[in-house]
């Protein structure tokens, strides 16, 4: 997947890094074992980490700066009305899409 973006030397280096990562003694295997161990001791291996690092340690207002369902491009607004117009259009679009799904 990175091949179109790299020259031959960069591709060779990347392939070696990937081989090393996935080898029996590589970091990838170690990380996988740690995740499997954690999964055997919890109902959900990711939930606590997600709550702590992706939600609670994130210091911006979550409602406007975080969405697990969609990634939006950064927007700059000169006045408060710009925020309101953008939010209104987003909600309108989401409701229009919901209407399509419901029909």
Image: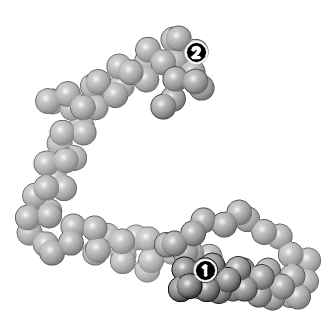
Residue at mark 1 to residue at mark 2: CA–CA distance: 45 Å
Q: Quadrant of the C terminus?
A: bottom right
Numbered badge on residue 7: 2
- Residue 79 appears left or right of 9: right
Task: Give the residue at the far top of this rendering.
Answer: 8
Q: Quadrant of residue 66?
A: bottom right
Is 33 drawn above or below residue 38 in the view shown? above
* Residue drawn at point x = 38 percent, y = 21 percent: 15
**Badge nearest the viewer, 1 or 2:** 1
The answer to which quarter of the image holds residue 43 is bottom left
Q: Residue at x 10, y 58 (%)?
A: 37
Crowd class of label 2 (few under 14; some 14 to 19; many from 20; radius 10 Å): few
Q: At x 14% / y 64%, what residue is drawn? A: 39
Q: Tag count in the figure?
A: 2
The spot of residue 73 in percent (x, y) is: 71, 63
Would residue 32 be seen by someone viewing this image from the given angle? yes
Q: Which mark is residue 100?
A: 1
Report helix, strand or loop for mark 2: loop
Q: Position of residue 96 (x, y in %)?
A: 67, 83
Res 60 visible: no
Q: Nearer the viewer, residue 99 or 20?
A: 99
């Amino acid at each position: 997947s990175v091949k179109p973006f790299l020259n031959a030397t960069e591709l060779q280096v990347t392939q070696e890094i990937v081989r090393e990562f996935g080898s029996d003694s590589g970091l990838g295997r170690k990380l996988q074992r740690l995740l499997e161990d954690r999964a055997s001791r919890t109902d959900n291996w990711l939930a606590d980490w997600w709550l702590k690092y992706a939600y609670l340690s994130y210091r911006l207002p979550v409602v406007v700066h975080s969405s697990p369902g969609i990634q939006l491009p950064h927007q700059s607004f000169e006045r408060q009305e710009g925020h309101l117009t953008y939010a209104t259009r987003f909600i309108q679009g989401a409701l229009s899409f919901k209407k399509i799904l419901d029909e």
